Amino acid sequence: MERDQKKKFYITTPIYYPSDKLHIGHTYCTVATDAMARYKRLTGHDVLFLTGTDEHGQKIEDKAKEAGCTPQEFVDNIVQGDRGILDLWNLMNISNDRFIRTTDDYHVAAIQKIFKKMYDKGDIYKGKYVGKYCKPCESFWTESQLVEGKCPDCGRDVQDAEEEAYFFKLSNYADRIQDLLENTDFLEPRSRVNEMVNNFIKPGLEDLCVSRTSFTWGVPVDFDPGHVVYVWVDALFNYTTALGLLNDKYDDYDHYWPADVHFVGKEIVRFHSIIWPAMLMSMEMPLPKKVFGHGWLLLDGGKMSKSKGNVVDPYILAEMFGVDALRFFLLRTFPFGSDGNFSNESLIQTINVDLANDLGNLLSRTTAMAGKYFGGTLPAGRQADALDEELLGMVAALRGKYEEHMEKYAFQNALAEVFKVIQRANKYIDETAPWVLGKDVAANGDRLATVLYNLLETTRICGVLLTPFMPASMDKLFDQLGAGEAARTWESAAVWGGLAAEVSVTKGENLFPRIDMDKALAELEAARQAAMAPAKPAIEMEPWQEDVDFDTFVKSDFRVVKVKNCEAVKKSKKLLKFTLDDGSGVDRQILSGIAMFYKPEDLIGKSLVAIVNLPPRKMMGLDSCGMLLSAIHKENDEEKLNLVMVDDKIPAGAKLG
Ligand code: ME8
């Protein structure tokens, strides 16, 4: 069918900050969006699924500085580098149609035009910003919005901020936003509406600061150099620039906008349900149909965050348990609109109970019996029984129930319906006891074929409905069931008889092997510890010396010495001759084999450390009274040496201890 004849569905994830590697919480949101996009494609929609990265802002600029690279190099590494964001979405089988990076040229140019439009309209004006700023959240707050003086989102300290800045007239839109939230289904779940209205709108919406001058890593305001556009303005419009708004890169704005739904985490509902519609109103653009604020995955009751060190790495879980098992667990276990506690135990438990035991066994027992009794191909004869009615009734009602939940983004409930049927089918095996019928296939062939067909057909229909959640595994399941293309469609999930009457099955690999809980938990713990250990030592370590007793050690007399003169020793490639002030009033001479590391003239005037109670030694005919301390290590097999230097304020002769 042509794209324009299908109903369009435009769905987005938030665009992620590439400030750290992503964790299971980010994966949760993207997997949910992917399952919804796949469901909509299955149900015949023309889907555009957008995700991407939100790459500007002070946090990224600071992180790049810390890492000693440019902000662009920093984000490139996290987005495109090994095990970066693109790799993760590829691994997780995310089917996004488009990926936007806010550093893409077309986006940057479009943001400049958008900012100018709102300015020309009078909705953006220049003023002075005095308030509080939460750096990790990149959020401005007024004094009254702080909670006990801290950022109301993350609870961290905020800093004073004052600078010339542009403001967006958010206050002008307060009434329209309140009406939108209270009197339409724009924001879901409904519980989030009260929070927005009571915490943000009723206390009075203040104009929003939308430019910054204290850092440069952002979209420049092209008509006022020195200002960069506030990162949230830059970020929110990604949903429209990625369709081609005010740029030539894409040409889908008229077709896909407004978005059907933005999936966002609960802490960014404020930006999506107040600031975003207000700016769209200013731009006189249609509003998205819905913002859905999902809950957080918690670890030990708290939000995962890199700074707390409690993040769960999706790579480790996907590699250990399989991508589909992880995708399934995330949406089967946690109600999408509420917070949920992540644990490895519940992940393994879900895999073992739902996937290995219920679904895996249903498939393997049924295909094994079809093989054993009929050589893999069912005969056409049938004999129905009253025992079949309940199972067949449940299967007939399944697609409708599933659809009702999916349309409300209630993934957990949709999956619960499918698993009720799978459990019922396993019970049906016990009730019909095909192994008893199989004792006399000649006499019971029609009945036995009916029982097995009912089981295969039930599994097929459940498989269709599980496809959005576990796409790769369901393809394998269909292959084992002998389901052709037409028996994998949404339409076929409402019609009994998708499999041929004389269907041929193949007993294939075990799709969901059972996991040994204790062994897996131990492996996860080892992986966690390995991830926490430094990747490799910063330098090649010299082995530790043998122990020395304390009394011997304290006899060593280390003193600060100042270099009065330093020169190369004639005929020696290595030796430098130091004349040192050691605080005694009499110059001390030390020879040191460091000529390949220092130029003598660079050391004059420096404060070094020497051991001064060694007996004098003759070197190249000269006395050396003591030794200078230096730090020595190897880099790529090359020896490096640095003299120990101390602050010039410390007088010559000061004792070290
Ligand atoms: O907020 N559980 O980016 P982000 C569930 N760049 N969801 C979680 C989570 C958890 N433990 N941790 C994070 C941003 N998330 C902005 C978005 S959109 C125009 C700009 C979710 O990388 C979080 O709630 O900090 C958010 O929806 C998403 O990951 C991206 O977070």
Image (cartoon, grey):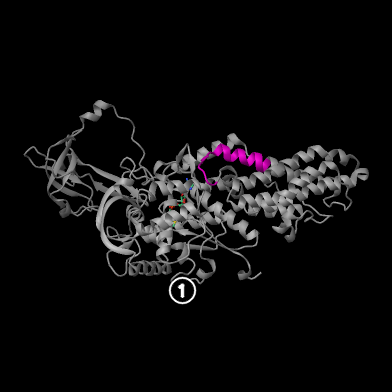
Name the kind of residue labelled 1 in the image.
Asp
Identified at 43% across, 63% down, the residue is 280
As helix, strand or loop, the secondary structure at mark 1 comes to: loop
| Magenta span includes 627 | no
Q: Position of residue 597 (x, y in %)?
A: 24, 52
In the displayed orientation, state which residue is furthest to the left: 585
Q: How many marks?
A: 1
Identified at 47% across, 41% down, the residue is 530
Q: Which residues are magenta?
A: 336-356
Q: Position of residue 82 (x, y in %)?
A: 48, 55
| Magenta span includes 355 | yes
Query: Could you tell me if residue 56 is visible in this image?
Result: no
Identified at 59% across, 54% down, the residue is 35
Image-quadrant location for residue 385: top right
Image-quadrant location for residue 114: bottom left
Q: Which residue is mark 1?
A: 248
Which corner quadrant holds the C terminus? top left
Horizontally, is 324 left or right of 175 in the view? right
- In the image, 624 versus 468, the foreground residue is 468
Label 1 CB less than 8 angstroms from ligand 1 = no
Label 1: how many Cα within 10 Å (few below 14, some 14–19, many 20+):
few
- In the image, 210 versus 486, the foreground residue is 210
Please say if 82 is above or below 437.
below
Horizontally, is 390 left or right of 158 in the view? right
Q: Position of residue 555 (x, y in %)?
A: 20, 29
- In the image, 30 versus 532, the foreground residue is 30
- In the image, 544 versus 281, the foreground residue is 281
